[in-house]
Image (cartoon, grey):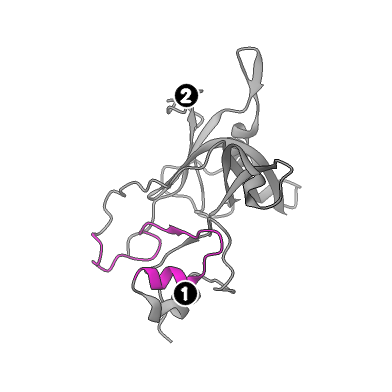
Amino acid sequence: MPELAKAELQQLDANFKPVKGAHDAIVQFNPETLKVSFANQIASADQKGTAGLQVVGAGTTKLSLQLWFDVTAEVPAGVQKESDVRKLTQKVAYFITPIKQGKNFLPPAVRFIWGSFSFDGIMESLEESLEFFSDEGIPLRASMSLSLLQQKITEFEFKKVAGAPPPGAGDARGTRPLIAAPAGGTVQGLAAALGKGDDWQSIAAANNIENPRLLQPGQLIDIDAKLEF
């Protein structure tokens, strides 16, 4: 079974084009889940019914995920082993730090890439928790919960993953494109729409979904994964 490549955070310029430099960060452990949220700004025109509602702006899309870092874990040959976990987490914290752009201070734009999934935005929030300390008081393990914000709602673009097997060739869960659940979507409905209605229970179990009748908008699902009962 091929191992999915590590996720990356890449710096972008003001036009959301890649910037070559030392600030790109490769995560130590891939996230377990990605959560994508969509929001529209709705204003009322003081009228009753839907005719009195107006959409304000182009909406927003938010990506939320959690990353783990642990300096006690084994590192590949040739990779420097750190003694303080903050040496690893500071590479992610760079993207929440405002930098001067003209007369304003703004955080750098960032692109999150993992397999075929790609998301461009600005880091809206970052929370770091130091989870484990050495006897000398040095932090050894940390979790980082972060969210990236995009000032628009766009369709997902799934990139081709190098070395990925062709569809139907027995590709492993995690190496295939994921499906984003629409508002009000259910596992049963998504599975039925793709001709997999009879497998909805095993698909829900394989994706660790506790309530298949109540999906979060933008929740990513591997519709080809299933467990045998």
For disc 1, the marked residue is 188
Image location (x, y in percent) of residue 177: 37, 56
Residue at 44% from the left image edge and 25% from the top image edge = 19
**Looking at the image, which is closer to me, 153 or 86?**
153
Instruction: Give the SS element for disc 1.
Output: helix
The magenta segment is 166-194
Q: Examine the rendered structure and indicate whether residue 201 appears above or below residue 50.
A: below
| Amino acid type, callout 1 | Gln
- The location of residue 147, given as percent across then percent down, is 61, 44
Q: Is residue 134 left or right of residue 26?
A: right
Name the residue rendered at 27%, 69% in the picture.
170
Number of numbered discs visible in the structure rendering = 2
Residue 205 picture location, percent across and down = 50, 76
Look at label 2 and name its amino acid.
Asn
Residue at 56% over, 36% down: 151
Drawn side of residue 31 relative to residue 144, left or right: left
Q: Which mark is residue 15?
A: 2
Q: Quick check: is 202 in the magenta stretch?
A: no
Relative to 122, is 184 above or below? below
Select label 2 or label 1 by which is in front.
1
